[in-house]
Amino acid sequence: MPFPAETSPAETPTAAPGRKILVIDDSALIREAAKIALGTIGGWRISTAVTGEEGIERAVSGQFDAILLDVVMPGMDGIAVAERLRAIPATSSLPIILLTACDRLEDSERFRDVPVAGVIGKPFNISDLTREVATLLGWLA
């Protein structure tokens, strides 16, 4: 995963400051990279969860503006988490962006069946992640 040598907040869109994002991913490296990209660079408030079950609990109990959700996780995968979140009234309209390293055709076909705001491939570039998320969610000015 590429880390930028130097990125200033002025170079990154800070549209929708103060947004609260939940990152659900079993990889500590991805959670930390998302915190740097979305929190430090993007200026958004970031919470994390390690498992799908923990992510669902946090999503229901918190007030988030969006979720970044890993597709491949042990136990409940991201597709199952997204489907469960859609079935819960408190989270049914919460925008979800899938994070995935999958590039197989059958995986991309599974994504089409899940109502999400978009898909971001892993590894992602930290300096581009805030812009990608803001673009997918329509948060750019």
Image (cartoon, rainbow, N blue to C red):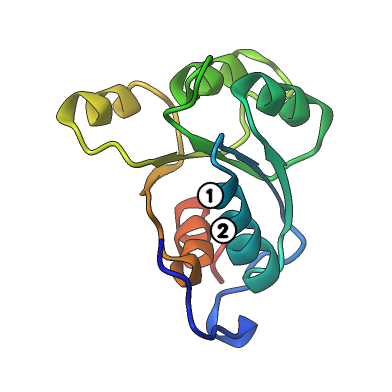
Image quarter hosting the C terminus: bottom right
Q: Residues within 10 Å of mark 1 (few under 14, many from 20)?
A: many
Furthest-left residue in this view: 105
Q: How many angstroms separate mark 1 from mark 2 (CA)? A: 5 Å
**Location of residue 58 in the rendering, given as x and y in whole percent from the top left corner:** 76, 30
**Location of residue 76 in the rendering, given as x and y in whole percent from the top left corner:** 53, 16
Identify residue type, mark 2.
Ala
Instruction: Name the residue that disc number 1 marks.
Output: 30
Furthest-front residue in this view: 28
Instruction: Name the residue that disc number 2 marks.
Output: 33
- Quadrant in which residue 140 is drawn: bottom right
Q: Name the residue: 58% across, 15% down.
A: 84
- Quadrant in which residue 1 is drawn: bottom left
**Location of residue 60 in the rendering, given as x and y in whole percent from the top left corner:** 76, 25
Relative depth, front residue between 2 and 95 = 2
Pointer 1 with pointer 2, Cβ within 8 A: yes
Q: Name the residue: 72% across, 30% down.
A: 59
Which mark, by number, is residue 101? none
Q: Name the residue: 22% across, 38% down.
A: 103
